[in-house]
Image (cartoon, helix red, strand yellow):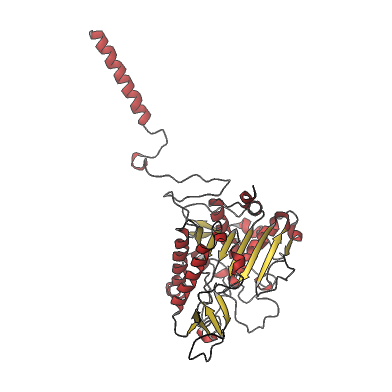
Amino acid sequence: MYTRQIFVSSVFLFLLALCLVALLPPRGSPPPGLFFQPLLSPVSSRSGMEHDSAGGECDYSDGRWVRDDDAGVAPPYNEDCPFLDPGFRCMQNGRRDDSFRYWRWRPHRCHLPKFNATEMLERSRNGRIVFAGDSIGRNQWESMVCMLAGASPAGASRVYEQSGKPISRHKGYLSMVFADYNLSVEYYRAPMVVMVDRLPTNVTSHDSGGVRGAIRLDVLPRHADRWAGADVLVLNTGHWWNVHKTAKAGNYFMVGDRLNKSMDIKEAFRLSLETVKDWELRSAQCSKSFFFFRSYSPSHYSNGTWNTGGSCAGQQDPLTTTTTTDHWGEEYSWINMMIAKTTERIRTRRRKARFLNITHMTELRPDGHPSRHREPGTPPDAPEDCSHWCLPGIPDTWNEVLYAHLVSMGYDTRRKHK
């Protein structure tokens, strides 16, 4: 009896020891204080999907520029791309340093995958990618077209404008067809996203003197019906939302048939975003679209504004930190705040919507503008261009962030036709 008790006790102790060994952390594991803290999610080389250290979506907007010699030696395309505006070909226009090309954006808490143009073309078969906005949105569109054309099997020879319109056209829209993929990458000029029109004859205003045009806050541009069928829609606005482009230019805000010559610009901007939101949520064609609203792209004028001798000449390296807090507060923080809020409201209605936040990374790059190296024929005393961007250049990174979001969201137009 006594021997049996000893045997049972021995078995119990043996099993208890096994359990304790199983619960011990393996060799090389974190110390006890870190054992239950979440670890970084592994990088997926196939999808580019990333998470931050808390397990949430990666904040690609928070990071720094790092030197990357490969980026400068082998950019995704060169200035010979036939789809570039002359004003964005800075080296051909006399810029001597190409240092602005030797930088890559590195987020602080996760990895930003490089733009894979071949994969983007494959994922976009039989699809439509649409950019709508101002001329800086056109900057981004040209970057996307050139990056994709460089990876097309036949090069640019099988890429053409759908209606034969020249790339120099700056009114209306352009649609570049990638014939080998049945893909169109389109740009629609819509600098305020809503309609900018001549003053309608039925306007009810006792004082329409000095009015040249109407910014119709409750009406989208005429070509907006073409946006709705896009697989990817990227909107941008902001640079025209100032007193110089509105009241001082004779363009006043209008809702319905009533002209309002005293409406605050911020209130007008809010109403315009409401129009975009309502349209996106109301349109059945938008229900499966990947919707992006890009944040404000900062300008870099020093010692004056664009029309008072402001300059960005001589800048050759990125900044390591921003020093223009007052400028930020006045020029575009309120624009970004409203865009982000609107996009989130669309997203909460089960839409595939994202705020494409490129402002901080772009504010650090005063070296990337055409500056004095504008298109041939520009008068010597013309203002410097410290708003648009040299290409190849900073808008390529915007498209890299766009690509990372699309891949992580499962973008693939081929599924529509299976």
List x then y, in percent, for residue 71.
62, 58
**Residue at image location 60% in from the left, 55% down from the top:** 115
Measured along the vertical axis of the image, is residue 175 above or below residue 125?
Answer: below
In terms of depth relative to the viewer, which is nearer, 361 or 408?
Answer: 408
Q: How many marks?
A: 0
In terms of depth relative to the viewer, which is nearer, 211 or 392?
Answer: 211
Measured along the vertical axis of the image, is residue 251 above or below residue 345?
Answer: below
**Residue at image location 73% in from the left, 68% down from the top:** 163
384 on left or right of 261: right
The outermost residue toward the front is 202
In terms of depth relative to the viewer, which is nearer, 103 or 248?
Answer: 248
- The quarter holding residue 341 reads bottom left
List x then y, in percent, for residue 369.
59, 71
- The quarter holding residue 82 reads bottom right
Question: Does residue 141 show up?
Answer: yes
409 on left or right of 163: left
List x then y, in percent, for residue 80.
72, 65
- The quarter holding residue 308 reads bottom right
Position of the N terminus by quadrant? top left
Question: Does residue 391 show up?
Answer: no
